[in-house]
Amino acid sequence: MHKTIHEEGRALLALNNKAALLGTIDDQGCPHLTFYNTIQGLGEQGLVLGQFCTGLSKEHLLKRPGCAFIALSTDKKWLRGNARYTHTARTGPEMDDYNNRPIYRYNSYVGIHTVWYFDLLGISDMYKLDVLKVVIGGISSRIAAKKAAKNEKQALSPFSQMLCGQVGGPKFICYEKADGMLSIIPIVHAKPAGSDRMVFSGTLYGEELAQIPQGANVAIYAGNRQMQSVIVKGIFSLLKKGVYMVDIQRVYNAMPPTSGYIYPKAAKPAEVIGFE
C-alpha cells in the first residue's frame, strides 16, 4: 500500500462515471458497503465524498471512523485503500466543486449538502480486471451455484437474484482482516445459489479470497448501471476447493424510495429514505 495518492489513482478517483464503494462496519460487527461515486482524492493524503442524502454508512462512520474504499473505471481499471473519517463541512471549495458539476448543478432532486473528509491510511497500485478470467469464473461459479442452491429462507427476492446474477454487473465482497482493517475484493463473476446463498470461484483473485477466514461476516454489493443495487450480508465459507460461498443472513435495499433491511423483514418500515 502507498501512503500517498499516485497520479493514476488521482485520475481514476476524479472520474464522475466510476463505480466507487465505501466499506464500513455496522452495529452488528458486519461489513457494510455503500455506493459513492463522489469519492475522490484530496491532495496527496486525503479523500472526500459528497453526501446528498442520509444513510447507514454515515452512522457507522461517526461510531467507527475506519473504513475502506474501492473505485472501478469503465475501462475495468481499479484500485482500493483504507481511510479514516475526520470531519464534515457544509461550505468550502470542495462543496463548491461538487455542486458546480453538471450532474448536481442542474439537478433539482439531488444536490451535495455535506462533504465528508478522510485521512488516507493506504492506497493500492492500479489493477485491471482480467476479462477472460471473469468469463471463466462466471461459468464455474454458475455450475457450482446450481449444485449448492438453497431456497429455504427466500432471503433474495427474484429481483435481487437477478441483480446478483447479472453478467458484468459490479459486485464486490468486503471483510474485516485480523488487523481490523477492511478489505474489498471484486467478485463480478459471483452468482446466486438459489435465494439463500452466493457462490463464486477463485478463478479471479483466488489468493485474496483464500485469506478470508472461514466463518467470517462479510458483505456483498451487487448492482447495475441503472443504479439498482442490493447488499447481501452473511457467513463466508469454502464450498469446495477453489469455490467459495456466503450463506445469506441479511439483505439490505439501498435504492429509493425507501432503503433498509428487506430480509429479515423489519418490524416497522425503514426510516432511511433514498440512496446512501
Image: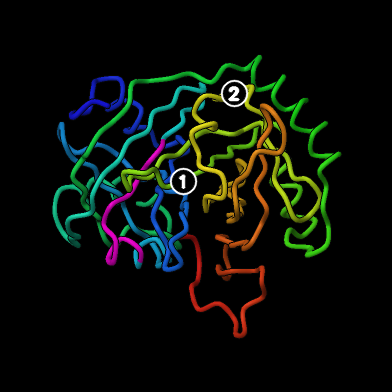
Percent coordinates x, y for residue 190 in the rendering: 67, 36
- Residue type marked 1: Tyr
Dot 1 crowding, Cα within 10 Å, few <14, some 14–19, many 20+: many
Q: Is residue 58 above or below residue 128?
A: below
Q: Earlier in the sequence, mark 1 or mark 2?
A: 1
* Quarter of the rendering occupied by the N terminus: top left
Left or right placement of residue 21 versus residue 46 in this view: right
Say which element carries label 1.
Answer: strand
In the rendered structure, are the residues bearing label 1 and label 2 in contact, judged by CB atoms less than 8 Å apart?
no
- Residue hosting label 1: 175
Percent coordinates x, y for residue 261 in the rendering: 59, 69
Q: Which mark is residue 204?
A: 2
Q: Nearer the viewer, residue 239 or 30?
A: 239
Percent coordinates x, y for residue 204 in the rendering: 59, 23
Q: What is the tally of numbered marks visible in this picture?
A: 2
Q: Is residue 34 above or below residue 127?
A: below
* Quarter of the rendering occupied by the C terminus: bottom left
Query: Which residue lies at the image location 48% right of the left edge and 33% below the top edge?
Result: 211
Q: Give the extent of the magenta segment.
A: 60-70
| Cα gap from disc 1 to disc 2, whole angstroms | 17 Å
Left or right placement of residue 57 versus residue 260 in this view: left
Query: Which residue lies at the image location 79% right of the left edge and 63% below the top edge?
Result: 154
